[in-house]
Image (cartoon, coloured by chain):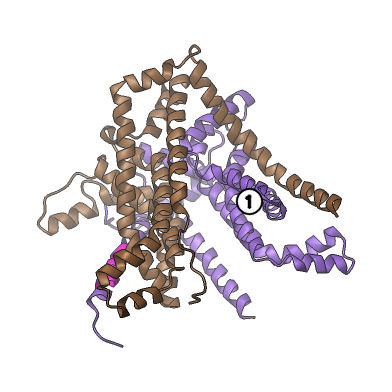
Chain colours: A brown, B purple
């Protein structure tokens, strides 16, 4: 029997080999090359990393990348929370409509979605026209950090809504009724019962949005200007324009470490602390 | 229980605003694509089909569409086969190995696009794969595998493995069991995985920008370079066409999906 299972296990392992081979060839080796070149070009050592943290522009861009990612994540949480809640309590028809609205943005390619934001945010664009007609002053949106944040938030919002929704769907609403019937104020019920139960979803969504935002390239490039450059653009410039693979590689490694570092720190918080059992809705 | 609830009203209005904010920017490109003048001023004036005509007659645009469609079709086949095999393997592996391999196979979704693109570009320069079909298919397959593994894996999770045992006990060979029992049952997962793989490749822009060549360009690369060059409503026409095509596919999927469930 054990020989049979061993053989079955070997076959199962064998089935994953092609996928792992593609990963090795097109991801692991390329990333390995980047790490290697960051340490050996132009000469062995950590000079590229010293240069990165010694140059004011780089540090500014690194901090800005984190700050944009932070604001985008915050905006996503604020917008996604009520939306995902509505999705989890809505009837089947309304729920389908709400899910469709989340998925429609994926029906056109990412580049085209950014084009839509260029159209909306430009100085003579729709948003400014609405602001003018309401008696406000024109705001400069395109080629600013604000414009980049607005565009990125819309593009990343679905990645926040979906994990949040999947957690909220599992929350037993009878717990809220129980709290209310025991005399708890609705606000207290929310903060003491619903919010803690939904937090794993918030963490999961926020982590995904944050790490995706850190690596954003197209949107900041097309919506932003020199004052809103993010790390990805800097990497591209070093490699393609300046042909400096060492420095570009070092920047890449820093972005990679930041991404996986945050994922590592955040993943324990994504687990559902309170497993819902029994309550079938 | 039908009484006025201010909380519900506020929630409803908030969700309506968010829904508009999610959907409206996507739809902006549709009126834009019928613009008369070569500008991206909104709302556009006049009506013309010249940008659609330009898309289908200008070889720069049309060739890139063909390249993208071919690459995406190849990626859909390769990634679906490899990804389905991996998902089946993961499901059958005992202990932590399966979970570990699954986590590894999903990492391409997380690695920052530009870092991956720079790495692939470096390797492709040495392997002379820049601007080649093989280069595109390999890179896009990498990015599509996670979606196939997730889609097929989700289907396998609800699949009753005892059906395979039953087929085997009745004398079916392993291959017969796979093709006549397992495959039909996980087909929905495989098909949605294939669709995701196609879309991932058709949409991919960052890695493609690095490994592109003037002779072999994908559609997103063409869109991107057009957008950085000038204000050309052809981009809006492309966006509208993709939107309409996707709507038709999803509409058909919904119709057939619900019909099968009803049967």
Quarter of the image with the C terminus of chain B is bottom right
What type of secondary structure mainly makes up the magenta span?
A: helix
Q: Is residue B13 magenta?
A: yes
- Does any portion of residue A243 appear in the rendered image? no
Residue in the picture at 32% in, 19% down: A54
Q: Where's residue A103, x and y in %?
A: 44, 61
Q: Nearer the viewer, residue B239 or A32?
A: A32
| Quadrant of the snapshot with the N terminus of chain B | bottom left
Instruction: Name the residue rendered at 70%, 46% in the picture.
Output: A16
Report x, y in % for residue A182: 31, 78
Horizontal and vertical percent for residue A270? 45, 53
Q: Image quarter for residue A162?
A: bottom left
Position of residue A95 relative to residue A50, above or below, is below
The foreground one among B102 and A238 is: B102
Mark 1: give few (<14), some (14-19) or many (20+) Cα within 10 Å.
many
- Identified at 42% across, 78% down, the residue is A91
The residue stretch that appears in magenta: B10-18
- Which residue is outermost to the bottom? B1
Q: Is residue A23 left or right of residue A154?
A: right
> What residue is drawn where x is 68% and y is 38%?
A21
Left or right of B111, for residue A27: right
| Residue position marked by numbered label 1 in the rendering | B76
Between residues B255 and A30, which one lies in front from this camera angle? A30
Q: Residue most toward the front?
A: A182
**Horizontally, is A254 left or right of B168 in the view?**
left
Any part of residue B174 in sight: yes
**Picture layout, residue A26 above or below residue B246:** above
Name the residue furthest left. Answer: A135
Residue A64 image position (x, y, % from top left) = 30, 35
Which SS class for mark 1? helix
Tell me, yes or no, whether the highlighted magenta stretch contains residue A247: no
Residue in the foreground of this view, choosing between A150 and B210: A150
């Amino acid at each position: 029997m054990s020989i049979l299972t061993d053989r079955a296990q070997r076959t199962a392992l064998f089935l994953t080999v092609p996928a792992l081979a593609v990963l090795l060839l097109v991801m692991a080796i390329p990333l390995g090359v980047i790490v290697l070149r960051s340490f050996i070009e132009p000469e062995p050592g950590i000079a590229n990393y010293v240069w990165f943290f010694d140059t004011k522009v780089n540090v500014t861009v690194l901090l800005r990348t984190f700050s944009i990612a932070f604001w985008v994540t915050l905006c996503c949480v604020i917008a996604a929370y009520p939306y995902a809640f509505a999705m989890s309590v809505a009837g089947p028809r309304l729920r389908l409509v709400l899910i469709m609205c989340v998925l429609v943005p994926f029906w056109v390619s990412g580049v085209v979605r950014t084009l839509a934001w260029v159209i909306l945010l430009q100085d003579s664009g729709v948003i400014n026209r609405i602001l003018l007609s309401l008696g406000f002053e024109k705001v400069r949106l395109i080629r600013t950090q604000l414009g980049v944040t607005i565009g990125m938030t819309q593009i990343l919002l679905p990645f926040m809504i979906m994990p949040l929704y999947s957690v909220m769907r599992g929350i037993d609403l009878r717990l809220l009724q129980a709290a209310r019937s025991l005399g708890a104020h609705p606000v207290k019920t929310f903060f003491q019962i619903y919010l803690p139960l939904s937090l794993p979803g918030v963490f999961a969504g926020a982590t995904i949005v944050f790490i995706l935002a850190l690596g954003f390239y197209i949107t900041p490039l097309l919506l932003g200007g020199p004052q809103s450059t993010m790390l990805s653009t800097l990497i591209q410039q070093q490699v393609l324009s300046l042909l400096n693979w060492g420095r570009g590689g070092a920047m890449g490694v820093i972005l990679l470490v930041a991404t996986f570092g945050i994922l590592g720190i955040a993943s324990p918080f994504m687990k559902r602390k309170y497993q819902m059992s029994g309550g079938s809705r | 229980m039908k009484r006025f609830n201010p909380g519900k009203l506020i929630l409803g209005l908030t969700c309506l605003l968010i829904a508009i904010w999610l959907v409206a920017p996507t739809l902006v490109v549709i009126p834009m694509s019928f613009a008369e003048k070569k500008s991206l001023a909104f709302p556009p004036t006049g009506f013309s089909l010249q940008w659609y005509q330009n898309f289908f007659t200008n070889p720069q645009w049309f060739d890139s569409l063909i390249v993208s469609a071919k690459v995406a079709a190849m990626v859909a086949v390769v990634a679906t086969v490899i990804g389905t095999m991996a998902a089946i393997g993961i499901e059958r592996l005992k202990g932590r190995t399966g979970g570990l391999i699954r986590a590894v196979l999903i990492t391409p979704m997380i690695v920052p696009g530009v870092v991956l693109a720079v790495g692939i570009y470096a390797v492709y320069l040495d392997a002379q794969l820049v601007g080649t079909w093989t280069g595109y298919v390999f890179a896009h397959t990498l990015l599509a595998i996670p979606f196939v593994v997730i889609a097929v894996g989700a289907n396998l999770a609800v699949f009753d493995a005892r059906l395979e045992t039953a087929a085997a006990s009745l004398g079916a060979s392993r291959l017969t069991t796979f093709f006549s029992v397992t495959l039909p049952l996980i087909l929905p997962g495989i098909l949605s995985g294939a669709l995701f793989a196609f879309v991932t490749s058709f949409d991919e822009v960052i890695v493609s920008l690095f490994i592109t060549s003037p002779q072999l360009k994908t559609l997103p690369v063409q869109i991107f370079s057009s957008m950085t060059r000038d204000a050309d409503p052809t981009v809006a026409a492309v966006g509208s066409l993709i939107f309409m095509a996707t709507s038709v596919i999803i509409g058909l999927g919904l119709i057939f999906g619900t019909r099968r469930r009803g049967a």
